[in-house]
Amino acid sequence: MSAFNIGLNIFSTNRQTNIVGIPPPELAALIRQHKDHSETQKKLITRLETDLDLNKRQMREALRILGENDVPDAQLVTKLVEIAGHFKNLRSGASADPGDSLSIVALKLDVQKAIDAGELTKADALLERVALEQRNSLERSAINLAGTSARRAEIALTRLRFGEAAGHFASAAAVLPFGDHDVKRICYLTSEATALRQQGDEFGDNPALLSAIERFQRLVTLTLRTRVPLDWASTQDHLGVALLVLGKRASDTSRLEEAVAAFRAALEERTRARVPFDWAMTQNHLGNALLALGERESGTSGLEEALGAYRAALEERTRARAPLDWAMTQTNLGNALLELGDREIGTSRLEEALDAYRAALEESTRELGPLDWAMAQNNLGNALLALGERESGTSRLEEAVTAYRAALEERTRARVPLDWATTQTNLGNALQVLGERESGTSRLEEALDAYRAALEELIRERIPLYWAKAQNNLGNALQVLGKRESGTSHLEEAVAAYRAALEESTRERSPLYWAVAQNGLGNALQWLGERESDTSRLEKAVIAHRSALEELTIEANPYLHGIANKDLARCLASLNQRREQ
């Protein structure tokens, strides 16, 4: 094989999801049908009211919020449980406080009535009036005013308005008197940072992630390790997750390295003996950060460390005690094994990765969590593709295509555009390898379409590294097509795609991806050079192949070293033959 495709694995962080047992399609139907529900739907609504502890009006408002925010079907259950939790917080926090004036007590009674009626807009307006009256006597009402701001934040969270919630939590922290209320202030500041991180993660808002990181860093200094070591460790873990999300989107590794440092710091206090489940969660997070770093390095030390972290997490995250967490970490373990297997000559690690993904799919079913199921299908496809590339037949490759197409049934562009683009890229990889083994070009054309579709979402400014990976893979498909044609247009396009990839995949920031793109560039230049009378393209091809081999050493990456070495030998033979003519 003369081209290296870069597969995209998606690994998951610790996500605790409450399942209320309602299939997403049924819940979606309730949201779309505002009135005249069938008897079956009415019974379902009554069941939801009981399970979620909501009254009829609150239930109606919760469904309206989900529809208003255009929540994807796969996330409806999770978001409904989240909204119900916020309603519970609102009910418990809207009572009168000591020292409230009679007018404020009356207003708070109206707030409670509005919340009971599911009238969140009215409740927020009434709380704004409460806040205004409290500001008039700030010295006396500072604590109560902070509570009011926090309740407004809960309303914003209930409405899935994370940026707005962060602002209210910040206001709550700002008005609290210093001294006796420092613990409460830190709680509000932590809630602000968490809301900003959620805004950044769910909406691709990098400025919000940067703000979350800055606030968690400040909280690390405010939370004294000597007094509250577990709170300090929790803050370090939160900081690490925010750094990891942002670091995966960047082409350099500085944020990922900071994430590793934060998780290691957390584990100094989050020991297995003291808090085993929190220890396992942070081990899983650490594995994710090490894997993200290891994917960009030409060696394997970081990947081996990631493997160790995941296996440590699985000692506590057992299938019997925490089946969904177990499945999550099994998926991540499979990612590390797959990345290691891609660099080795044998296939034992790849087979282990396949086993890990299939194990995860036993718990991550499509019914319980369609997006987690789709993620596992995507990664299963990657393992099948890696094995299929090393076999003479096409059965594994066809299985990989099937897995990717299954993933795309849930990973739609409208619902999760980045995940959709990731799987489109991987589908293109499988189609390309199949196309190389067939005489026709239909599969190769399909691969081109998949890569170009992916690049509509993998925008360089937003996620430069994924953009560079897709450019590299696009170059591979163009190169294979170009070799079969008499013209040179596809080969020239391939050279342009590889050079584009190298603008972000630099040797300093991601040496492995840089080497892969260099080798692909060398191949495209060679095929062009063999069709030209002079030797300049062939000479440039030799330089590119030799550059790739500086990182693809036999010690660090024997499998890719062998392929790159053959490509260089073929290119040198072509150049020498031309010089002898």
Image: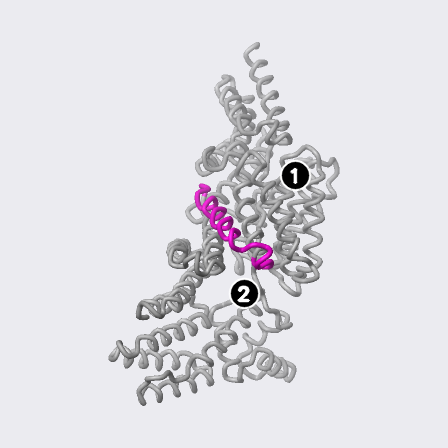
Query: In the rendered structure, does residue 148 fall within the stretch colored magenta?
Result: no
Residue that protrudes farthest toward the front in the picture: 226
In the image, 260 versus 68, the foreground residue is 260
Q: Name the residue under label 2.
A: 72
Determine whether the residue tagged by mark 1 lies in a helix, strand or loop. helix
| Residue sitting nearer the eye, 219 or 518 | 219
Q: Can residue 489 be seen in this view?
A: no
Q: Which residue is farthest top?
A: 580
Where is residue 311 drawn, in percent x and y? 64, 49
Up/down of 15 relative to 66, above or below: above
* Dominant secondary structure (helix, strand or loop) of the stretch shown in magenta: helix
**Location of residue 192 (image quadrant):** bottom left
**Residue 467: x, y in percent?**
48, 44
Image quarter of residue 54 = bottom right
Residue 410: x and y in percent read 61, 59
**In the rendering, at what x and y percent does residue 530 appear?**
56, 21
Mark 2 vs mark 1: which is more N-terminal?
Answer: 2
The residue type indicated by label 1 comes to: Gly
Residue at the (44%, 56%) spot, across then down: 225
Left or right for 133, reference 527: left
Q: What stretch is highlighted in magenta?
A: 251-278
**Is 258 one of the magenta-colored residues?**
yes
How crowded pointer 1 is (Cα within 10 Å; few <14, some 14-19, many 20+) is rated as many
Mark on residue 341?
A: 1
Can you tell which quarter of the image residue 1 is in? Answer: top right
Query: Quick one: which residue is furthest to the left in this view?
Result: 136
Left or right placement of residue 209 versus residue 71 in this view: left
